[in-house]
Amino acid sequence: MTTPNERLRALVHTREFLRDLCDSERTPKVPDSVRAEARRLLRHYPLDRDLKLVGMALPLWFAWREG
């Protein structure tokens, strides 16, 4: 069973992964089409402030912790 903390961590790590895909120094040899798709997805990906609000509204689904 996925815990609220694991669910939030998955969102944060996915955002980091998409950011890495956009950076040619961190992820060389990634096709331009993949980089473009990662940038497109990041445009609408939730920011920390969004995740914090979701965690406050739905603590049984997403566990937000400061720091």
Image (spheres, rainbow, N blue to C red):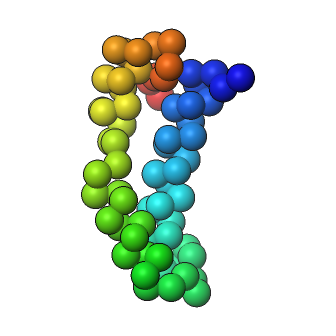
7, above or below 31, in the image = above
35, above or below 50, in the image = below
Tell me residue 3's x, y (percent): 63, 21
Residue drawn 55% across the image and 82% down it? 30
The foreground one among 20 and 67 is 20
On the question of residue 8 being in view, the answer is yes
Lateral position of residue 33 relative to residue 27, left or right: left
Residue drawn 50% across the image and 54% down it? 16
In this rendering, the count of numbered labels is 0
22, above or below 63, in the image = below
The foreground one among 7 and 19 is 7
On the question of residue 63 being in view, the answer is no
Among all residues in the image, which is located at the extreme front? Answer: 1
Q: Quadrant of residue 10?
A: top right
Tell me residue 13's x, y (percent): 55, 47
Tell me residue 41's x, y (percent): 36, 59
45, above or below 60, in the image = below
Screen quadrant of the N terminus: top right
Tell me residue 23's x, y (percent): 45, 74
Residue drawn 47% across the image and 28% down it? 67
